[in-house]
């Protein structure tokens, strides 16, 4: 089933209901959004010459056209490739080339960057600026909704690992449907009068949650700023009512700080779903004190989108429970549509209290990585997704994450894999060796620290910063450079990152 069918249904049953707002202003009703998605679908198929299953990339900051392009692509039977708009053009180039995207939609600030990104691609995609005259020219006669198989590719999500390159997790229409149903069952009940505020990037969790809100017939709200501003969030919550949003712990902390300082009205803010990084117990308790009983947590990955465990509001809010602190330190209990098991290296299921790798299976789990059979076979074994995360269940069934076996760094809800940063540093002639680790940070969750063995003349931190900014996204660059005479290594020459973390 094509998930865009939900859009078509709401356009018939509730055509005048607003589907997308820009700030406080209505942008399109369900009837208009469905008609325009169908018209854009015609342009994608006939004017751009795309065939069923072709990939359409979205290199866009948050904008109302994001929902239109996403739904138009699905309506046409195409697959969406949402790309983090914070990436460096070189990183975007890899995703475009690897995915084989034949068209890419961009917000105005990315047009020049895409020229750089597409320069080295043998068959560069068509580039369309969202909202431009060229964008409008794509719209034609409405295309009938394309029928697709449940396993048809819908969302190609490029996720981080430690191999130095992102991998495209293949998410089908069935995967997105299972994710949406899991959200409405286990995380937050949403009704047609509610709305989702896209303060976080729509290329990631916020955009994925567009799907359950679409299923519920609710509205999408895109801030006029196109991003996160705490004053704007609270103003929009007061305007719209029934507001939900997805937020990395960094965003939650900033919301709490603003609320504590300015005491904005909170009645319209229904639910804040946090995830994408560790939330410290002290931070959550302060959030409850300042903003009240509005918080729920999810744990998921791009490979099992937003759907492994959930800590529902009823658990977060139960401050009288004798194990409340332990519960809110966990990532909750398995969502209803998945099985979750902690296994040892041999694949044996472990009892409560023992730490092992978190494994999940269910209708939400990806079919594999795009054109990467090796990575797929390592992640999917005997029907289970091996997440690479280490955790343990307690006797009540709550899962606590202990560490990330892949050395992944999560800063501000964004994934950063150390090898990519290390490779960027090692390209500098003044760097002999480099190793990157994450350091706990009360605001960002983690920050990147680089240990560097320098050559003479040794580069300065400012020089390394400039070098990294020319090669990787700004948010991935180290926040601190520590120059050392040598890196700690084991007998096999492998850098001991545990020793580096101990130095921090």
Image (spheres, rainbow, N blue to C red):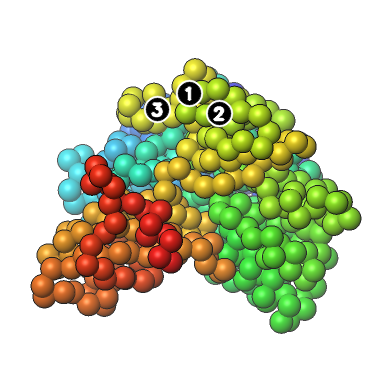
On screen, residue 17 versus residue 229, left or right, reads right
Image spot of residue 308 (x, y percent): 62, 36
Residue 364 disc label:
none
Residue 132 visible (yes or no): no
Label 1 – label 2 distance at C-alpha = 8 Å
Marks 1 & 2, CB-CB < 8 Å contact = yes
Residue 346 disc label:
1
Image spot of residue 413 (x, y percent): 52, 56
Image spot of residue 479 (x, y percent): 38, 70
Instruction: Name the residue beneath numbered marker 3.
Output: 378
SS at mark 1? loop
Query: Quick one: label 2 or label 3, which is nearer the N terminus?
Result: 2
Instruction: Name the residue beneath numbered marker 2.
Output: 343
Which one is closest to the eye, mark 2 or mark 3?
Answer: 2
Q: Nearer the viewer, residue 57 or 64?
A: 57
Which one is closest to the eye, mark 3 or mark 1?
Answer: 1
Residue reaching furthest to the front: 491
């Amino acid at each position: 089933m094509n998930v865009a069918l939900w859009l078509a249904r709401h356009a018939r049953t509730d055509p005048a209901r607003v589907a997308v707002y820009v700030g406080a202003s209505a942008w399109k009703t369900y009837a208009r959004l469905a008609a325009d998605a169908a018209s854009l679908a015609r342009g994608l198929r006939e004017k751009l010459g795309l065939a069923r299953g072709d990939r359409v990339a979205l290199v866009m900051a948050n904008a109302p056209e994001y929902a239109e392009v996403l739904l138009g692509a699905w309506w046409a039977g195409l697959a969406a490739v949402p790309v983090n708009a914070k990436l460096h053009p070189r990183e975007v180039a890899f995703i475009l080339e690897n995915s084989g995207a034949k068209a890419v939609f961009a917000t105005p600030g990315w047009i020049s960057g895409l020229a750089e990104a597409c320069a080295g691609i043998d068959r560069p995609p068509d580039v369309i600026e969202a909202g431009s005259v060229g964008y409008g020219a794509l719209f034609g006669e409405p295309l009938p909704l394309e029928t697709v198989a449940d396993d048809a590719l819908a969302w190609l999500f490029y996720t981080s690992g430690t191999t130095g390159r992102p991998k495209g997790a293949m998410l089908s229409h069935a995967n997105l449907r299972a994710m949406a149903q899991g959200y409405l069952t286990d995380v937050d009940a949403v009704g047609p009068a509610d709305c989702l505020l896209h303060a976080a990037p729509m290329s990631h969790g916020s955009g994925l949650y567009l799907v359950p809100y679409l299923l519920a017939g609710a509205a999408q709200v895109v801030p006029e700023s196109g991003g996160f501003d705490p004053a704007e969030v609270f103003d929009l919550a007061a305007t719209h009512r029934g507001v939900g949003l997805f937020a990395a712990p960094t965003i939650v902390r900033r919301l709490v700080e603003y609320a504590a300082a300015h005491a904005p009205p909170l009645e319209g803010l229904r639910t804040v779903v946090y995830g994408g990084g560790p939330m410290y117990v002290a931070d959550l308790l302060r959030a409850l004190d300042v903003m009240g009983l509005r918080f729920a947590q999810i744990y998921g990955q791009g490979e099992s989108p937003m759907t492994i465990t959930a800590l529902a509001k009823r658990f977060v809010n139960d401050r009288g429970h004798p194990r409340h602190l332990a519960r809110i330190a966990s990532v909750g209990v398995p969502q209803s549509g998945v099985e979750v098991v902690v296994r040892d290296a041999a694949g044996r299921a472990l009892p409560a209290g023992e730490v092992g790798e978190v494994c999940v299976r269910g209708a939400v789990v990806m079919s594999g990585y795009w054109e990467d059979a090796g990575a797929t076979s390592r992640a999917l074994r005997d029907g289970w997704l091996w997440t690479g995360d280490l955790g343990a269940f307690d006797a009540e069934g709550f899962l606590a994450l202990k560490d990330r076996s892949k050395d992944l760094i999560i800063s501000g809800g964004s994934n950063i894999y150390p090898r990519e940063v290390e490779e960027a540093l090692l390209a500098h002639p003044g760097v002999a060796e480099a190793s990157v680790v994450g350091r706990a940070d009360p605001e960002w969750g983690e920050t990147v620290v680089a240990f560097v063995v320098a050559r003479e003349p040794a580069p300065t931190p400012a020089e390394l910063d400039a070098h990294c900014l020319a090669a990787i996204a700004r948010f991935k660059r180290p926040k601190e450079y520590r120059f050392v005479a040598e890196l700690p290594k084991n007998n096999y020459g492998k850098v001991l990152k545990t020793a580096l973390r101990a130095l921090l």
